Amino acid sequence: MWRRAPKRLRQTIVVLLGSTVVLLGLALIVLPGPFTLPLLILGFAILGTEFAWAASALEKTRAGVVAGGRVAKRAVSAAAERSGRVIRRRGTPDG
């Protein structure tokens, strides 16, 4: 049903919905509240259904999240080593 709608109508709906979600995610960067990154990713995913540039932005956002996660893990490990404590994951034989 969605694909049978006129392309211009689909794009208008996608732009309105996707942009609203992205703007809400950007607002949550400065306003107190959770879900900043999930909203940005969701907004770009919505926009990416109709626009190639948004799909590309989504991939860059995902790559940034993955890289940020790696940096955070290294920082936690380094802090744990400096404090002399060992952080173990649940489900491991030691944890």
Image (cartoon, helix red, strand yellow):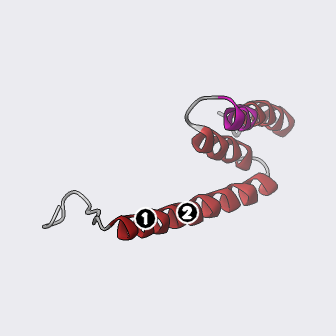
Q: Position of residue 39 (x, y in %)?
A: 62, 38
- First in sequence, mark 1 or 2: give its number: 2
* Residue 65 shown in magenta: no
Q: Give the class, few, some or many, for how many residues have Cα within 10 Å of label 2's Cα (few <14, many ≥20).
A: few
Q: Position of residue 55 (x, y in %)?
A: 72, 56
Residue that carries the numbered disc 2 in the rendered image: 66
Residue 90: image quadrant is bottom left
Q: Is 82 on the left-hand or right-hand side of 88?
A: right
Q: Which region shows up in magenta? A: 22-31
In the rendered image of this protein, does residue 68 appear above or below residue 49?
below
Front residue (pair 40, 6): 40
Q: Residue at x 43, y 62 (%)?
A: 76
- The reply to whether the C-beta atoms of the residues labelled 1 and 2 are less than 8 Å apart is no
Front residue (pair 88, 8): 88
Residue that carries the numbered disc 1 in the rendered image: 79
Identify which amino acid the numbered label 2 is placed on: Val
Identify which amino acid the numbered label 1 is placed on: Ala
Q: Give the class, few, some or many, for how many residues have Cα within 10 Å of label 1's Cα (few <14, many ≥20).
A: few
Q: Position of residue 75 (x, y in %)?
A: 49, 65
